[in-house]
Image (cartoon, rainbow, N blue to C red):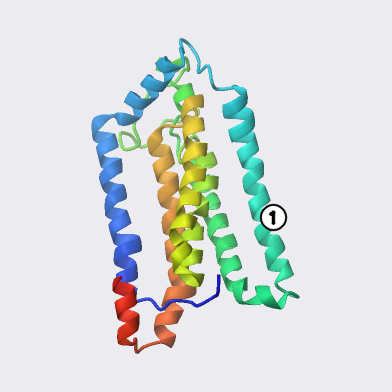
Amino acid sequence: MTPTFDKKIPEHYFRNHLLLPGLLFITIVSLIEWSHFDLTLSQFLFHLEGGVDSWPLRGAWLTETVIHKGGRNFVILLGLIIIGLLIASIKKVNLRPYRKGLIFIFLSVLSSVVLVRLGKSITDIDCPWNLKMFGGSADYHSLFSRVGDLNSPGQCFPAGHSSSGYAWVVLYFFALAYGKQYRWLGLSFGLGLGMTFGLAQQFRGAHFISHDLWSLAISWFSAALLYYVMFARSQSKSSPVIQSQDISALEN
């Protein structure tokens, strides 16, 4: 990819990357809450696995060893690659144009993981495997149904493992800055990784689907806002006059 730094019109950027995704997120989360789809899906998965008083796939080789532990190591490897490229950009001339983008990826992934970790530490939302209906000891409470329960095991919301995958939706924005034709490939990688991690955790009884959606939202909006600060805003300030061909390209 050649670093071209496509010009952005701020109002278009906010509409397409913040307003519309925000409305979609609120709609989906509201429907899940209203329909109790969290419980419906988890009960379906629990009985599908043949669960009686525990989740059969909680300690399974594929879900725990490969996807949970292996996935965590894979994400650590990705982070080390980004750090390695940043260090290499100090001396490698061909990497220097990408340094800002690499810093952007690092900060975005870090902020997504930290925000999710912070959310887990201040909420008392239970994992499915904590609940009485799935062999645990806690009562079920939806996200918006209470203020808090000091007796709850909690700290299962938002979903930590899937957030380490969804954090890589930042590659969509990286491509938006350096080569727009690759943005959907970057988005597919982040969504695919997060969904793989999230589904495995749902099969283990570690999270409800809404936990994963919140993690995706945190990752997306963290990347979108940071992109605006580091790229879109500075481009709009440095290019106050946008040529007609640029506007046509944006509309397409």
Mark 1 element type: helix
In the picture provided, is 164 more to the left or to the right than 94? left
Query: Residue at 62% across / 41% down in the picture?
Result: 72
Query: Residue at 76% across / 75% down in the picture?
Result: 91
Query: Residue at 46% across / 51% down in the picture?
Result: 188
Between 183 and 210, the one nearer to me in the picture: 183
Residue 35 higher or lower than 96, as above or below: above
Between 156 and 226, the one nearer to me in the picture: 226
Residue farthest along the right direction in this orientation: 91
Residue underneath mark 1: 80
Tell me residue 133's x, y (percent). Answer: 40, 16
Name the quarter where the C terminus is drawn: bottom left
Between 252 and 77, the one nearer to me in the picture: 252
Is residue 101 visible from the viewing direction of this image? yes
**Tally of numbered tags:** 1
Disc 1 marks which amino acid?
A: Leu
In the picture provided, is 18 more to the left or to the right than 199? left
Tell me residue 187's x, y (percent). Answer: 45, 54
Which picture quadrant has residue 148? top left
Tell me residue 152's x, y (percent). Answer: 46, 27
Name the quarter where the N terminus is drawn: bottom right
Tell me residue 82's x, y (percent). Answer: 65, 60
Neighbour tally class for label 1: few under 14, some 14-19, many 20 plus, Cα within 10 Å: few
